[in-house]
Every structure is written in structure tokens, then in C-alpha cells.
Image (cartoon, rainbow, N blue to C red):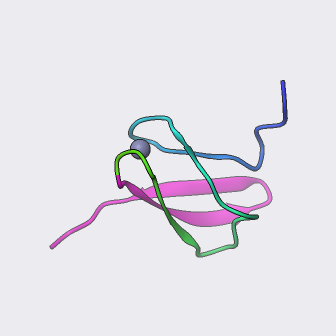
Amino acid sequence: MPDTNNKVLCPDCQAEIKGESPMLGDILECQECGTEVEIISTTPLRYRELIEEK
Ligand SMILES: [Zn+2]
């Protein structure tokens, strides 16, 4: 298995969210479903889903 430590998986659809090395505080958007995740830690990589409120 390739290392998965630096991959961000969409919490909604499990698609891999592509990105060059994620930085703390980055917000990445899933290309599949549009869910946004915020990087809350880089070592180890941790992130959380951003709930969009409008
Ligand atoms: Zn998704």
C-alpha cells in the first residue's frame, strides 16, 4: 500500500482530495461532492469537515 498519511479523504464520499502538501489552516474542497475540509494538523495529518452555513 502506498502511504496514506498525507492524503485527505473526503469525510462525506471518501474520495481523495488532491492537494500539494496541505498546510495548517488550509481549506480543501472535494472535487466529487464539494465538501470542504479544514486542515487542523499536519503532523499527523488531521482535518475536519467544514459545515457550510449560509
Ligand atoms: Zn466528497
Q: Residue furthest front?
A: 31
Query: What residue do we see at 58% from left, 73% from top?
Result: 26
Quarter of the image with the N terminus is top right
**As displayed, is residue 48 above or below residue 12?**
below
Query: What residue do we see at 62% from left, 53% from top?
Result: 18
Q: Pinpoint residue 16: horizontal percent, then vertical percent.
A: 58, 42
Magenta-span inclusion, residue 46: yes
Q: Pinpoint residue 4: horizontal percent, then vertical percent.
A: 76, 38
**As displayed, is residue 23 above or below residue 43?**
below
**As displayed, is residue 35 above or below residue 5?**
below
| Residue range (magenta) | 34-54
Quarter of the image with the C terminus is bottom left
Magenta-span inclusion, residue 42: yes
Query: What residue do we see at 59% from left, 65% from top?
Result: 39
Of the four image quadrants, the one with ligand 1 is top left
Find residue 19 and report its image quarter.
bottom right
Left or right position of 27 against 46? left
Find residue 23 and report its image quarter.
bottom right
